[in-house]
């Protein structure tokens, strides 16, 4: 049987603005509309950040609640995944939206360099965020920016510190972090399979590396992330007209590799999430 591919759409993030691409959805209403278009195109996970009215990053639980309500109404069975990343807040504020009980939430289990700063994920914060996810029955998506993050994620899962099924996303192409390197990518897959056989995984490429990582992951049997959070262009000279356009590009790659697109029901089964 051909293996379905889960497409995650990272709709907004904390960095991209309308100055980078007018299609970047900033308000909750824009985010709901953009996600619905991406859902119709084949995305089954919505990776969500929220913004303040001026477009700056926010960790406001009320905005997350409004976004989740809209997505549940307009994108039936789509997997809602909140970001607990560090650009939108510090300390406990990074998990202030977890009581809303989304299906999933991102979790980075170690620190690394970003283009202009250190992305700090100290052990006590990781422990607290993982504990909140267990408390509210939220499955983490491990965002691995480094090989050590894969090892740590597996150790935490084996220790019972992570709720639900282990799911790891390889993030490559962030400046000053792990480059988009094919040998490293292949070793990531080999390492995860050795440490936690059968664990589903995803890959995300930043900027021009997005399509590259889409291609690698789909061909290798993994799942993919795309969206305006990570990349605002179709190519060097063409802005992406929407999140849906980036999803459609991933779907075309799936078609070339004879990978069907996972339905929401199939994605939930693969990730061990409630229907």
Image: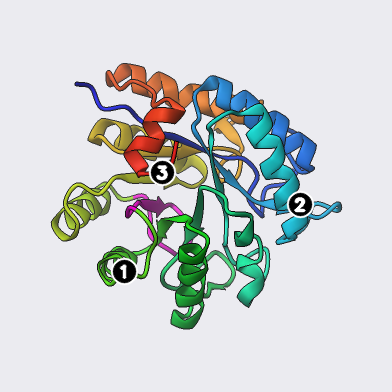
Direction left: furthest residue: 194
The Cα atoms of the two marked residues, 2 and 3, are separated by: 24 Å
Q: Secondary structure at mark 2?
A: helix
**Badge 1 density bin: few <14, some 14–19, many ≥20, Cα 10 Å:** few
Mark closest to the chain's N terminus, 2 or 3: 2
Q: Which residue corresponds to the image point at 47% horizontal and 71% vertical from the top-left?
A: 131
| Residue identifier under label 1 | 160
- Where residue 166 appears, x then y in whole percent? 32, 55
Residue that numbered label 2 is attached to: 63
Residue range of the region highlighted in magenta in the rendering: 165-180
Q: Which residue is mark 3?
A: 273
Marks 1 & 2, CB-CB < 8 Å contact: no
Tell me if mark 2 has few (under 14), some (14-19) or many (20+) residues whose alpha carbon lies within 10 angstroms of its own: some
Where disc 3 sits, the SS reads: loop
**Vertical relation: 102 (above or below) 90:** above
Which residue does the image show at 48% across and 24% down from the upper left? 249
User: Which residue is outermost to the bottom?
Assistant: 124
Q: Quadrant of the C terminus?
A: top left
Q: Position of residue 44 (x, y in %)?
A: 49, 32
């Amino acid at each position: 049987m051909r293996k379905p591919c889960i497409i995650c759409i990272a709709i907004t993030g904390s960095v991209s603005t309308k100055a980078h691409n007018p299609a970047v959805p900033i308000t909750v209403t824009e985010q709901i509309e953009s996600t619905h278009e991406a859902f119709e195109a084949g995305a089954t996970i919505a990776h969500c950040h929220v913004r303040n009215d001026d477009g700056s990053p926010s960790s406001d639980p009320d905005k997350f609640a409004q976004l989740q309500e809209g997505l549940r109404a307009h994108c039936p069975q789509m997997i809602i995944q909140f970001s607990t990343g560090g650009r939108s807040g510090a300390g406990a504020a990074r998990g202030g939206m977890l009581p809303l009980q989304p299906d999933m939430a991102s979790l980075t289990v170690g620190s690394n360099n970003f283009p202009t700063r250190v992305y700090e994920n100290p052990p006590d914060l990781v422990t607290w965020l993982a504990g909140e996810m267990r408390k509210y029955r939220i499955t983490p998506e491990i965002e691995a920016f480094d090989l050590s993050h894969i090892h740590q994620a597996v150790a935490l899962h084996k220790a019972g510190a992570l709720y639900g099924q282990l799911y790891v996303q390889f993030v490559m192409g962030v400046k000053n972090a792990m480059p988009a390197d094919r040998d490293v990518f292949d070793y990531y897959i080999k390492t995860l399979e050795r440490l936690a056989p059968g664990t589903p995984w995803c890959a995300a490429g930043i900027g021009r590396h997005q399509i590259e990582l889409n291609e690698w992951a789909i061909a290798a049997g993994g799942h993919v992330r795309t969206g305006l959070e990570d990349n605002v262009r179709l190519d060097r000279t063409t802005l992406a007209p929407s999140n849906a356009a980036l999803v459609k590009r991933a779907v075309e790659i799936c078609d070339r590799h004879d990978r069907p697109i996972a339905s929401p029901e199939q994605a939930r089964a693969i990730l061990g999430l409630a229907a």
